[in-house]
């Protein structure tokens, strides 16, 4: 295979010539010739390029051949060649071998597409042609093969105008030049287009040919005449305001022939489609002037004509509804299918200043938010004057009311503005009078101004920001604790107050209702226990419902828990670990034995304790002071008749209602005193072997030891346990 544009290529042949004889009879020569002996072109296009000799085993020769191209190939003229390759050895006679070769010419993209002669390059298209209309069809040919010869058609965007790109498109496959979807052809705007196009092949390095389609638009009668109105009414002082862009005006009581306005009728089409004629449509009174007007031709030019609308009789404004007359103008062109435009005109009849102004309402209700800056627009008062050119002047009625000092009125617009910063909580209503004058006549109206509330006040606590409440401990759920109260000087939602607790600490044990009542929340370990926490602190937030911002205030509320007799006395002595004492059998009646001790975590009478001795066989031998708890001997003890251990039931009772008590057992061991009393030593001295703490053995008893010394020694030795009397 050889590329067609290559003029001197060398192609290796896919064969090798081998002769199995010895070198003497090996390969000698090769000859290349056309397979068809009459194909002289093939004979002149190729030759064998060179021979490379290789020596194989046995002295045989082996050669490789190349084919050389002598002249450039042209695939479009001929795409293949058939050759015959002959090899001969050196024998006598020589032996030969031959091989048939086919050379295929590969295509190169060496040709541009060429436009076919039947393409129509100049066309006429109606400006009303619908989207998708085929303007013309492009056709081109490319003699190359494959993709190099396949042609696509394009709109040349680089050369096309924006208007062309907006209205035309080219089908890449069919070559149809069409109107795009949404195309807007308008002869009155653009009369012709030049559509640049391309025919391009699909080769890897594509080649193209340019062309241009000339599109001329055909005018259609697609434009209706337009009517423009220009007023000619005389201006007075004060000048009347414009009645409207399409309206005419004429002073009342003017003689016939007075011009009310100019009418200019134009048509953007051409020829007869642009030849316009206008007339007044007839009608009943109040329409088309009831014969009050006529059209007077002023000039005629290509595509436009001018008329004057003039009166045919004097007009009386007071006898006309709305002070105006209606006139209907109809303009049509001269096209084969004429297009018509109808314009209804309102001809205002100008009046004299013979009517007073009147406010649109006797009382103007206005509202303004408080706290706005002075100069804020509050509202607008409005007066009307049936005259045609009222120049009204607004003002506050002098001396009407001191309230007028807080506002101002714009003399031209009637806008009412504030002059002070209003405070609704100080005053919420004002009244004043305004006046409107046209220079000759005047009218008055009342303005009632209401100051609207804004949320400019936070709730204020009744009784201050620190408050105290009391509730009994152990109160059940929903028990009322007390009520907090706050007021808000604002109104509406801005002044509506609700309450909530700041969620921290003690707030879990209480709730608050919308009316400010604080109540107990019990259960889940939240019971009130004065002995654990005598006072609780709450942060109560009072907030309003203002928008967009709510205001709030915080009060620190202390809740003091009132004591309940919910704790029984707790015996400290005797206790479970310390409930035994030793008492001398020689202790005199009235002698101190021990001191009962107890504690109660309640307060006041609920914690005031009394001690007692319970029923038992030894109850009468002991006495206890109810207040101090001092236990004394009421009857003598005899070691000989007493048991080794006396069990005495003791109790501690509080003074709550009802009272609570706790009982315990005190074990008393009666003992004989030592033969000789020695003053007790400090607890740190060693005790005698087998003796009790504080005792020391003596050589012989001493009769002089008195009962008081014995008692002191016994008490110091710790036999009585607990604190001493008192």
Image (cartoon, grey):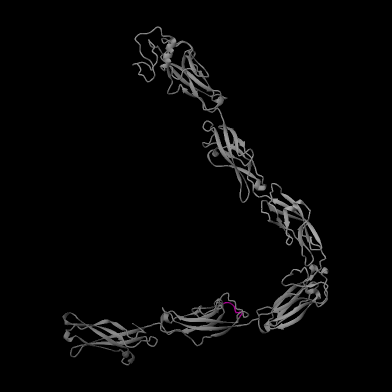
Nearer to us in this view, 563 or 10 = 563
Query: Overall secondary structure of the magenta stretch?
Result: loop
The residue closer to the viewer here, 714 or 575, is 714
Residue situated furthest top in the rendering: 703
Q: Is residue 283 magenta?
A: no
Where is residue 5? Give x, y as percent.
37, 84
Region of the chain picked out in magenta, as a range: 127-131
Q: Give the percent coordinates (x, y) of residue 288.
A: 78, 74
| Residue 338, placed above or below residue 496 | below
Placement of 503 over or under 60, stated as above or below: above
* Residue 475 seen in render: no
Residue 227 pos. (x, y %): 71, 76
Q: Nearer the viewer, residue 484 or 172?
A: 484
- Left or right: 503 with respect to 13? right
The answer to whether residue 483 is seen in the rendering is yes
Horizontal relation, residue 263 to residue 184: left or right: right
| Residue 113 rendering spot, x and y as whole percentages | 45, 84
Please indicate whether residue 505 sits to the left or right of residue 714 in the image: right
């Amino acid at each position: 295979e050889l590329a067609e544009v290559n003029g001197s290529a060398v192609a290796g042949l896919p064969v090798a010539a081998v002769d199995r004889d010895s070198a003497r009879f090996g390969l000698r020569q090769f000859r290349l010739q056309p397979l068809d002996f009459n194909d002289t072109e093939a004979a002149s296009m190729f030759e064998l390029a060179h021979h490379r000799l290789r020596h194989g085993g046995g002295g045989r020769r082996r050669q490789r051949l190349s084919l050389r191209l002598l002249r450039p190939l042209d695939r479009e003229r001929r795409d293949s060649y058939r050759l015959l390759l002959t090899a001969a050895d050196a024998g006598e006679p020589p032996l030969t071998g031959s091989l048939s070769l086919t050379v295929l010419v590969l295509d190169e993209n060496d040709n541009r597409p060429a436009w076919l002669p039947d393409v129509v390059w100049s066309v006429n298209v109606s400006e009303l042609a619908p989207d998708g209309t085929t303007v013309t069809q492009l056709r081109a040919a490319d003699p190359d093969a494959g993709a190099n010869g396949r042609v696509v058609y394009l709109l040349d965007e680089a050369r096309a105008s924006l208007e062309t790109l907006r209205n035309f498109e080219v089908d890449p496959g069919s070559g149809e030049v069409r109107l795009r979807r949404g195309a807007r052809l308008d002869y009155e705007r653009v009369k012709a287009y030049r559509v640049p196009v391309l025919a391009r092949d699909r080769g890897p390095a594509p080649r193209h040919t340019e062309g241009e389609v000339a599109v001329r638009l055909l005018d259609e009668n697609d434009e209706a005449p337009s009517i423009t109105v220009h007023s000619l009414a005389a201006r007075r002082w004060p000048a009347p305001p414009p009645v409207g862009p399409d309206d005419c005006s004429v002073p009342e009581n003017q003689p016939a022939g007075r011009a009310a306005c100019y009418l200019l009728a134009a048509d953007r089409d051409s020829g007869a489609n642009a030849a316009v004629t206008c007339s007044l449509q007839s009608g009943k009174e109040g329409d088309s002037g009831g014969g009050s007007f006529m059209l007077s031709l002023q000039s005629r030019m290509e595509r436009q004509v001018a008329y004057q609308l003039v009166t045919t009789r004097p007009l009386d404004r007071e006898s006309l509804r709305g002070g105006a007359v209606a006139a209907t103008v109809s303009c049509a062109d001269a096209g084969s299918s004429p297009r018509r435009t109808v314009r209804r005109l309102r001809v205002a009849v100008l009046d004299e200043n013979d009517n007073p102004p009147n406010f649109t309402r006797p009382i103007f209700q206005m509202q303004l938010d408080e706290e706005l800056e002075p100069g804020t627009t509050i509202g607008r008062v409005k007066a009307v004057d049936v005259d045609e050119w009222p120049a009204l002047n607004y003002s506050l009625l002098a001396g009407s009311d001191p309230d007028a000092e807080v506002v101002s009125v714009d003399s031209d617009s009637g806008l009412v503005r504030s002059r002070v910063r209003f405070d609704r909580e100080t005053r919420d209503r004002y009244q004043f009078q305004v006046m409107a004058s046209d220079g000759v006549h005047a009218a008055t109206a009342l303005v009632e101004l209401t100051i609207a509330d804004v949320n400019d006040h936070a709730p204020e606590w009744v009784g201050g920001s620190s408050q105290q409440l009391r509730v009994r401990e152990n109160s059940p759920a929903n028990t009322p604790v007390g009520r907090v109260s706050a007021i808000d000087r604002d109104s509406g939602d801005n002044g509506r107050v609700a309450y909530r607790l700041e969620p921290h600490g003690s707030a879990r044990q209480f709730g608050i209702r919308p009316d400010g009542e604080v109540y107990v929340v019990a259960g889940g370990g939240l019971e009130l226990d004065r002995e654990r926490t005598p006072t609780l602190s709450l942060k109560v937030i009072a907030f309003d419902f203002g928008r967009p911002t709510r205001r709030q205030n915080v009060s620190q509320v202390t809740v003091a828990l009132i004591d309940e007799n919910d704790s029984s006395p707790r015996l400290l002595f005797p206790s479970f670990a310390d409930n035994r004492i030793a008492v001398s059998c020689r202790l005199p009646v009235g002698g101190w034995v021990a001191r009962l001790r107890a504690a109660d975590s309640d307060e006041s009478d609920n914690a005031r304790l009394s001690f007692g001795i319970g029923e038992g066989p030894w109850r009468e031998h002991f006495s206890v002071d109810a207040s101090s708890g001092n236990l004394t001997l009421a009857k003598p003890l005899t070691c000989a008749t007493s048991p080794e251990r006396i069990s005495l039931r003791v109790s501690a009772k509080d003074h709550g209602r009802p009272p609570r008590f706790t009982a315990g057992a005190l074990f008393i061991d009666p003992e004989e005193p030592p033969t000789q009393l020695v003053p007790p030593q400090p607890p740190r001295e060693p005790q005698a072997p087998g003796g009790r703490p504080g005792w020391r053995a003596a050589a012989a008893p001493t009769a002089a030891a008195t009962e008081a010394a014995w008692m002191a020694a016994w008490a110091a030795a710790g036999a009585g346990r607990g604190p001493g009397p008192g």
